[in-house]
Image (cartoon, rainbow, N blue to C red):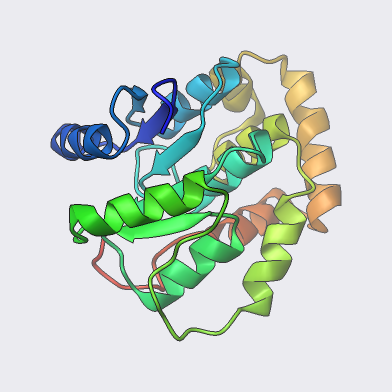
């Protein structure tokens, strides 16, 4: 592998990031790695314009809602392969990760040999997922298609709308004019086919992991 490989690691646990960084260093010696620990930091890293060859993404970071980080990353950088690293190994979680655009899924409990196999497959342009028997979910497929219509900025607004923030709060967080936020909200509701902010927030809840495996964390 090239020593110019650039990898984005997104996980809120410092010890796990350190372990992952070490494992990736064994797989891709000389790779440059950038670490982030929250949804907002992930957004900043992606918005920076820095080129990445691979993103390793935890599902449960502060500011994220289930698969929202994955959907955001895929919308902003569709060419960037994303491998989910999660302690939630429920077959439906793995299937949903694939439907929402991940290139791979590695359980946090997996040995380094499995991580290496997955990373090498994805960097070669393939996909890598553990064997599981859950069928494709049309509801998830439709949700992914609807969210794919949003621009990255609209996705940022939607995630904060789903958190219950008011337009002025969203404007402050994203450094936008309040009227700009209003325009985005109107466009979001139209694209998602929703009649209210509440309906849009409920739609986003469909990205959550709560139904996949109670008590597990990404």
Count every numbered label the image shows and give the total. Answer: 0
Tell me which residue sits at (68%, 78%) in the image: 138
Q: Quadrant of the N terminus?
A: top left
Q: Position of residue 217 (x, y in %)?
A: 27, 57
Residue 86 appears in the figure: no
Tell me which residue sits at (35%, 25%) in the image: 31
| 21, above or below 71, in the image | above
Q: Nearer the viewer, residue 162 or 207?
A: 207
Tell me which residue sits at (73%, 68%) in the image: 142
Residue 126 appears in the figure: yes
Q: Quadrant of the C terminus?
A: bottom left
Q: Is residue 20 left or right of residue 58?
A: left
Q: Nearer the viewer, residue 151 or 85?
A: 85
Extreme residue in the front direction: 1
Q: Position of residue 94 (x, y in %)?
A: 43, 68
Tell me which residue sits at (64%, 34%) in the image: 77
| 168, above or below 76, in the image | above
Extreme residue in the left direction: 15
Q: Quadrant of residue 195?
A: bottom right
Q: Quadrant of residue 139?
A: bottom right
């Amino acid at each position: 592998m090239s020593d110019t490989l650039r990898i984005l690691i997104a996980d809120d646990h410092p010890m796990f990031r350190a372990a992952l960084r070490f494992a990736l260093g064994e797989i891709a010696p000389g790779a440059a790695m950038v670490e982030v620990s929250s949804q907002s930091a992930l957004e900043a890293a992606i918005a920076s314009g820095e080129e990445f060859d691979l993103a390793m993404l935890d599902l449960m970071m502060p500011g994220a809602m289930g698969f929202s980080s994955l959907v955001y990353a895929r919308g902003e950088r569709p060419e960037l392969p994303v491998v989910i690293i999660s302690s939630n190994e429920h077959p439906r979680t793995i299937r949903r990760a694939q439907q929402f655009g991940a290139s791979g899924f590695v359980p946090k409990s997996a040995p380094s040999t499995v991580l290496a196999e997955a990373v090498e497959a994805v960097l070669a342009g393939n996909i890598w997922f553990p064997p599981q028997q859950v069928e494709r979910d049309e509801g998830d497929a439709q949700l992914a298609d609807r969210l794919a219509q949003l621009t990255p900025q609209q996705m940022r607004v939607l995630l904060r709308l789903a958190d219950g923030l008011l337009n002025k709060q969203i404007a402050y967080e994203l450094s936008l004019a309040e009227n700009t936020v209003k325009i985005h909200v109107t466009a979001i509701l139209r694209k998602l086919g929703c009649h209210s902010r509440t309906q849009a927030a409920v739609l986003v809840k469909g990205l959550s992991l709560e139904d996949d495996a109670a008590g597990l964390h990404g």
